[in-house]
Image: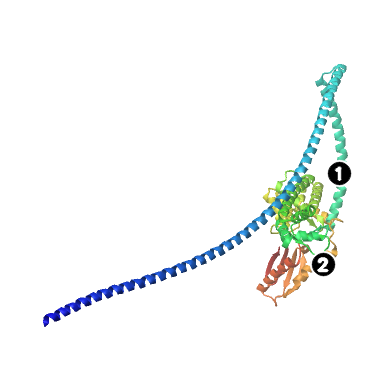
Amino acid sequence: MTGPIVIAIVITAVISSVLAIVLLKMYDRLRKKDAETEAAGILNQAQIDASNRLKEADLEIKEKALAQKTETEKELNKVRDEMRQRERSLDKRAETVEQQSEHIRKQERMVENTQRRLTEKLEDTTRRNEELEKLLDMQRQTLHELSGLTREDAERRLLEMLDKEMVQETGAMILKHRKRTEATCEEEGREMLLTALQRYAAAHTAEATTSTVDIPNDEMKGRIIGREGRNIRSFEKETGVDVIIDDTPGVVIVSGFDPVRREISRIALNKLIADGRIHPTRIEEIVKETQSEIESLIQLKGEEAAHEADIPGLHPRLSYMLGRLHFRSSYSQNVLRHSIEVAYLSGMLAEMIGLDPDVARRCGLMHDLGKAADHEMEGGHPKIGADLLKRHGEPKEVVHAALGHHDDITTEHPYTMLVATADACSASRPGARRETLERYIRRMEELETIANGFPGVEQSFAIQAGRELRVIASSKQTDDNSAARICHDIAKAFEEQLTYPGEIKVTVVRESRFTELAK
């Protein structure tokens, strides 16, 4: 009974094992099919995603390419525009160069014709000189034969005769001119001394600070201003002056304290208007050209003034500063002509009292040299002029005359008094200056009115021909600090409201004294 049961159990176990193996194989096969199906699905999805991304990438690349193409076209258009502008500019320059070349060719033809004429004249002159030499030789031989003298003896006798005649004529002319000069110097010296004693007064400088330039029409004002003001800004930057363009018809105003810069600006603006080409580059060229011309003119004017006043050995820098006075005026009197006149008067006065006229003329010519630089350096023109003269090795008499010709210091040399006298004679003679009494009084009243308008000021007095103002402050309404402030404010008010060269000294008197310079 036990045996069949065991067999049945074994058989059952074997069958169960076989069924289990079969089931496992079937299960593995099913799992494998599911995995393959899932892998195929994933692969299909990946292909779809990859295809979509490729399409997106293609679109993005096409958009970037389109944007790049648009940007490139803009750059190309910009480059084409620049190239067209350059081509137009080159065409204009080529036309200008062609015109200049044609002008040069005409000049060359003229020079060739002139050279040919000169060569012909030179040959003719040489031929005539040769004929003249032959005639002279024949005359010499004839004279030698007739007189029986050698050439050396004839020349010696002729020179002796000429020497005797020249001595006699020279002596007679010297006596004649000496008598005439003595009579003239005595008469004019007496008159000048009387005028100096009667009318001596310290001078005060005042000059115009504007120049006017005529224009053909009001359209030229717009061309001077330029697009968005670039022309007028360039002109003001190059010249250092202000150009005033208002509603006044046919006129443009150039304003500046420096007379040399103002003259350069006036001439340069006239050249630009005549030329018609007004742009920053042309403005720079014209201004530099005009500056060079004015610099040469200044040096020439200084040398001419020194030569006219018979002042040898003048330093080139002093000649240049002297030439700058040609563009400076005082009460409409040209300062350079005034200096030359003072030089002559000083020399004549020195001869009358037995001093060296050469030194006196040198002192007179240089006495107002500081006015050439008082817009650029600090201080009044006597001090500036004295510093310039001392720096360039002028004698102490010349330096002192420049420093003290307005009686600002104690006189140590007689030449200083001579220069002061000649300065007053030149400035006060009838017609020398156009300053009227009414204008002088009005200027003095302006100084006092401005000062009296400040609180705490009791009285004010303009002295030294308007070069100094004395202010009396109220001791009740002010203290030392406020008095110093009033002094500073008055000086600033003069700088803002008045136009004047040099300096105005403001002195406020209270329990303490404060001084400021209106520069």
Residue 513 seen by the camera:
yes
**Considering depth in this image, is 354 or 322 the residue closer to the camera?**
322
**Considering depth in this image, is 44 or 445 the residue closer to the camera?**
44
Q: How many marks?
A: 2
**Amino acid at pointer 2:** Arg
**Considering depth in this image, is 431 or 9 the residue closer to the camera?**
9
- Report which quarter residue 207 is drawn in: bottom right
Would you place residue 470 above or below residue 72 in this image?
A: below
Q: CA distance from mark 2 to mark 1?
A: 45 Å
**Amino acid at pointer 1:** Glu
Would you place residue 370 above or below residue 449 in this image?
A: above
Q: Which residue is mark 1?
A: 182
Along the polypeptide, which appears first: circle 2 or circle 1? 1
- Report which quarter residue 33 is drawn in: bottom left
Q: Which numbered marker is on residue 460?
A: none
x and y percent of residue 160 in the render?
83, 26
Would you place residue 308 above or below residue 484 in this image?
A: above
Q: Residues within 10 Å of mark 2 (few under 14, many from 20)?
A: few
- Observer-side mark, 2 or 1, equals 2
Q: Which residue is mark 2?
A: 442
Q: Residue furthest bottom?
A: 1
**Considering depth in this image, is 393 or 97 the residue closer to the camera?**
97
Q: Looking at the rendering, in which quadrant would you find the C terminus?
A: bottom right
Secondary structure beneath dot 1 equals helix
- Report which quarter residue 31 is drawn in: bottom left
Secondary structure beneath dot 2 equals helix
Q: Residue at x 22, y 75 (%)?
A: 17
